Image: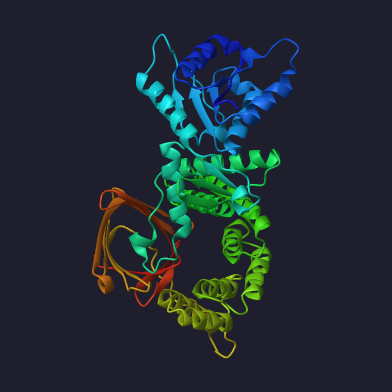
Amino acid sequence: MSDVFISYSRSDRDKVGKIAELLTKKGYDVWWDKRLLPGDVWLREIATGLRETRLVLVLWSEKSIKSDNVLSEALYGIKKRTLLQALIEDVEIPYFAEIIQASNIVGWPDKHDKTELDMLLEAVKKTLETKPVESTGSKDDKIVDIRNASEKAKDKIKTIKKMSDTTESKIGGIEANRTVEDAGEVIEVIDTNLEVMDKLGEKGREVNDIRVENVEISRIELLVQKAKLLIQEANRMKADENAPEKKKNKVLLKKQKEAYRVLEKAGELVPENTEILLEKAKLLIDLTPDDPTDEERLLYKIQDLLKTPKNDREQFHIAEATMLLAISRGDYNKEQLGEAKRMFGKIDRQDRVEECEFFIDLAELTSLEKSDDMEEVQPLPQPAEFQPVGQWAVYVSDAMNSFISLNINPDGSFSCLQQVPAIGLNMEAQGQWGYNQVNKYLQIQGMRADWMPFMMGITIMGMQENQYHGTGIDGFLYKFSRIT
């Protein structure tokens, strides 16, 4: 059994020979195919060397990134949890291997960064000192244990896991709308992990989870969080006043459709996951506004699956499904809204209770307008168009009765202070705002306490009792009272 198997392109033989010589001088038994004798069965010998090595070192160059053999050997290293890699030319490593730390030894031995070479040698030593993991046929065999992960990959995996573990916020406003500032980068890491899983699946090994250090995350979690990040990016587009409307709508639709496709993949793995069904239904409300049939089918399925909710999370899902069914056709079914209100009350979600009450009030107004018993129906006075600029007192219908002092300036900037008296929390924030008059969508995004990004999106629905009412993308109801 060799210590190190070097995977490379034959055109790089001279460079590889020097690296093999260096590792040999360090006391390692190095396997590279130069030592194959004439007459040896080439592929069989390489396969044996790969199978019996303790570490796979892939050297990336212009030629090796295009070599099917090198790509297969890199995948084998990931599968065996023993892959190390280094750049010997300035190239982009294959997508699926980006999660593994890569040393840059371009130019060695003539000129190079000694620190990078030392890091590679240290990684070889550390990997060989680690006891190999044997297959046991257990659940752990379906986990890819990524060793030598890059720092970027470690940080992003932890971010994704934290997103996945976060429970439904009971505070609206700034707190509930914290965002992942580098959503694009996080999506790239998710895609890389999914690519690793898929590639190993093609090699005959079913993979359900990724483990980086002590953080384990499943394929389903990766898919759901990718969909949510795509939805977050779509929401950013809604109030972008600088983008041409046609182009903005095209990009928005593309993001929403991609998010739906991702949720479809997740749903194939767990067809009865009510969180996935609910997210799909919410997307369909935007994707098929003139035909509520598909989202209603999903919402009815959630109701059927959760006839007897086992916990508050399931109770929330069935209540949400019931409320969405009540408003799906625009006529606000009072009976269903009353049932949803009762369900939300059971789990102390006063924010959703107030939202149901708001829709019930709208249903009564609609009923009044259509009443045949009145001799003459006077049209209801139309409220003044919502104009964001000014100073506002914003009441949030969350469980903590949050209050936001919001200053929206004509130059596109805003500042605000959110107060949560129940827990003595005060949060300041500032940033930029935008308002789309067509879909009545207000978006404010910026930084909380100068370092934490957030984005709020609120659809202004109408005016009642001198207050503008809106529904946030966080699900909370917002009531705007103009101060000046």
Q: Quadrant of the C terminus?
A: bottom left
Residue 128 in the figure: left or right of residue 169: right
Q: What's the residue at 59%, 48% (across, down)?
A: 258
How far from the left and from the top, in percent, is residue 59? Answer: 54, 21
Q: Is residue 377 above or below residue 404?
A: below
Residue 409 in sight in this render: no
Residue 376 in sight in this render: yes
How far from the left and from the top, in percent, is residue 137? Answer: 66, 50
Say how the picture is coloured.
Answer: rainbow
Q: Looking at the rendering, which quadrant does residue 373 occupy? A: bottom right
How far from the left and from the top, in percent, is residue 477? Answer: 41, 70
Q: What's the residue at 44%, 60% (across, down)?
A: 166
Q: Is residue 385 above or below residue 14?
A: below
Q: What's the residue at 64%, 25% (across, down)?
A: 49
Front-lying residue, 474 or 410? 474
How far from the left and from the top, in percent, is residue 358? Answer: 45, 77
Q: Looking at the rendering, which quadrant does residue 422 occupy? A: bottom left
Front-lying residue, 417 or 135? 135
Q: Quadrant of the N terminus?
A: top right
Q: What's the residue at 43%, 42% (across, down)?
A: 154
